[in-house]
Amino acid sequence: MYRVKSFKIVSLFFVSFLLVISFFASVFKQSMTVFASDNIEIIACEGEKQEVQKEIIKWVDFNIDGQSLKSVLEFCKEYRGKPHSPSFAQTLSYLSIKNSNEFDKSSSLGILKKLRAYLDEGNCILDKYGDNKYFLRYQQIYHAIFDGLVGEYEMVCGTTQYGIMGYFPIAKGFDYNHYDDFGNSRSYGYKRRHLGHDFMGQVGTPIIAIEGGTVTELGWNKYGGWRIGIRSCDQKRYYYYAHLRKDRPFALDMKLGDRVEAGQVIGYLGYTGYSEKENTNLKTGSPHLHLGLQLIFDASQEKGSGEIWIDLFGICNFLTSERAVVTRDDNTKEWISQSIKVPILAK
């Protein structure tokens, strides 16, 4: 009898314990739903409401080589205007799925050959990967990177073309050298990774706007020296040009809020920075341009620990064919670009 009563007491206690746990789990679930409500999107589907988690991209591993980018562009030109013609971003996303995001010229050409056969049979990339979450993520990333660099544009002379809308950052006729230095160590102020791409060159070399946009930063920074920041028209990219020339770092009359176009001279190469004191040259190192590209998928990523900077080595090699022609104004001693591109959609 004692054992039976003991068993009943234990059972009652266990059931009560489960009810308490269930109650707190319900409260916790509701709390988490409220906590995450800012990141929930309600979508109507056949009369029903579904909650879909909006995923903000917080990290990008971009490692596409310049030759692969050129091959993809030629592929897109070939199929432009045809049924099921893939966009530049879609083609890159397809390659990323097929090669596990490990790019080289040889494998890219092989994958594009198979894709050509697939499309020629009347198929469409989206038929196969339109619902693939990895494909969709890659597509969002490549749109963010290339929407201002590849597409339809108009030259100053009035001709319309499809291709590279952007420009190489060093003007035509000026020497430079570079290598992939993204991620290298830097120690001034504090130890950190190098989140940009350096071009070695001569002081006074004209610096070209890779893409059009609005000047959002202009002045001195103790790390980058004289620098310019340009935000793209769609707000997804921020270009950072740093270590500009001492005394006359910027193009004449440039100011905050100015609209610039791809191909425009915005400043001059130098080696200022690493100093609290304005207009100071680096104590060590050679004249160079520090170029950075930040991707912005959400307003929270504009400043702070959530910033996303990508390796520009492959993109810069992709842009080498697009070097702006400049001429010198003997009166102002300024270099003026003769090569301006305006994206059709931005007009």
Image (tube, rainbow, N blue to C red):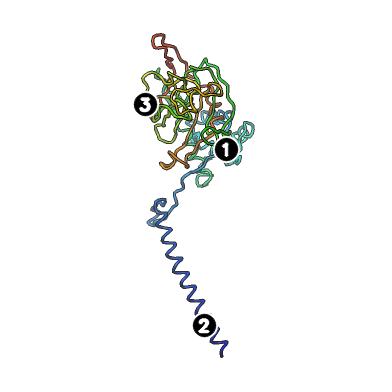
State the residue at coordinates (43%, 15%): 335
- Picture layout, residue 233 above or below residue 306: above
Outermost residue toward the top in this view: 330
Front residue (pair 315, 77): 315
Could you tell which of marks 3 and 2 lies nearer the N-terminus? 2
Name the foreground residue: 74 vs 69.
69
State the residue lying farthest toward the front. 277
First of labels 3, 1 by sequence position: 1
Element at label 3: strand
Inspect the image, locate mark 1, and give the three-letter code of the amino acid beneath it.
Leu
Please state if 265 lies on the left or on the right of 99 as rendered.
Answer: left
Of tags 3 and 1, the one toward the viewer is 3
Q: Are marks 2 and 1 in contact (CB under 8 Å)?
A: no
Q: Nearer the viewer, mark 3 or mark 2?
A: 2
The residue pinned by badge 1 equals 95
User: What is the secondary structure assignment of the residue under circle 2?
Assistant: helix
The residue singled out by tag 2 in the image is 9
Tell me which amino acid carries mark 3: Arg
Q: Residue at x 59, y 39 (%)?
A: 101
**Mark 3 lies on residue:** 259
Query: In the rendered image of this protein, does residue 237 appear above or below residue 45?
Result: above
Q: Secondary structure at mark 1?
A: helix
Question: x and y percent of residue 164 in the render?
Answer: 49, 26
Give the camera-side residue of 185 and 307: 185
Picture coordinates of residue 59, whole percent (x, y):
51, 42
Q: CA distance from mark 3 to mark 1?
A: 35 Å
Alpha-carbon span between mark 2 and mark 1: 64 Å
How many other residues sit within 10 Å of disc 2, few (<14), some (14-19) or many (≥20)?
few
Residue at the image position 35 percent from the left and 28 percent from the top: 257
